[in-house]
Amino acid sequence: MTDIPPATAGLSVALLEDDVILRDRILVPQLAQYGLTVEPLGTAAELYRRLEQTRFDIVVLDVGLPDGDGFAVTQRLRTTQPGMGIILLTGRGDTPNRVRGLTEGADAYLAKPVEIEVLVATLHSVARRVPQGAIATNGLTRGWHLDPKGWKLVDPQGATVLLTKSERKFVACLLENLDEVVPRETLVEALTKDVYDFDLHRLDNLIHRLRRKVKESTDLPLPLVSVHGEGYVWLSV
């Protein structure tokens, strides 16, 4: 084996590939040699069902699926699973498809056949960019996160808060930049296309309403900190 650092402890990977031989006889055993926990899946529907029960740090998926295409899956996951890493593994290695995959939200795009060392190195690279509050261990998610469908905010103890469309966009933007200051302008851009006509008091009211809803529904305070003159930080707790 090429000298690649051991896999991140507890890293959970979903492998969505309908080629059973490639998936179960080649990729899964080889990835296991690097200490990665890999769950093999054959369809997008399977993945969506599993996401109702557990969380994955990274999903590796083929573009050509029996019940859809990887681009559509990528787009959906980026909306509903903002903290998840996404790697497209496909035979469509041409530039237009590569650009499309990355534009839809994939973190990396690898063409088949791929060397296992390259795939493992890519997994490590993507893992370093996954927000720490979204990392899963033994199927459980640590920290605050959005539920698989993205309409509920879940606290570290499992209590949930139902979100409006605007609150969902606001939370997703912050969770994608965990422990980093997100400028108010960036948050406004996540909420509306008409940034120049947006009343900043609406943002203040949204945050006030969200804090109140969290206080009423959970035993934990919202880990949102205001940085005067700059923006807001969602802390990993």
Image (spheres, rainbow, N blue to C red):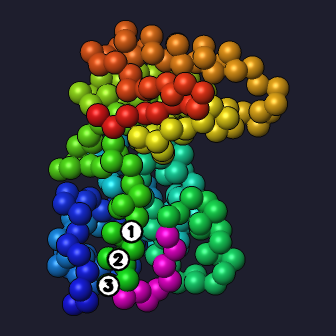
The residue at which mark 2 appears reads as: 121
Q: Are marks 2 and 1 in contact (CB under 8 Å)?
A: yes
The foreground one among 185 and 222 is 185
- Image coords of residue 36 (percent x, y): 22, 68
Alpha-carbon distance for marks 1 and 3? 12 Å
| Image quadrant assignment for residue 60 | bottom left
Q: Secondary structure at mark 2?
A: helix
Q: Which residue is pictured at 39% across the width and 49% down the height?
A: 131
Mark 1 residue type = Ser
| Image quadrant assignment for residue 35 | bottom left
- Image coords of residue 54 (percent x, y): 28, 46
Q: Which residue is pictured at 63% across the width and 21% down the height?
A: 203
The residue at which mark 1 appears reads as: 125
The residue at which mark 3 appears reads as: 117
Mark 3 residue type = Glu
- Residue 226: in magenta span: no
The foreground one among 105 and 180 is 180
Q: Would you say residue 43 is visible in this rendering?
A: no
Q: Are marks 2 and 3 in contact (CB under 8 Å)?
A: yes
Asked if 71 appears above or below 183 in the picture, the reply is below
What crowding class fits label 3: few (fewer than 14 Cα within 10 Å), some (14-19), or many (20 or more)? some
Alpha-carbon distance for marks 2 and 1? 6 Å
Alpha-carbon distance for marks 2 and 3? 6 Å
The foreground one among 221 and 30 is 221
Write down the region rendered in magenta: 108-115
- Image coords of residue 162 (percent x, y): 45, 22
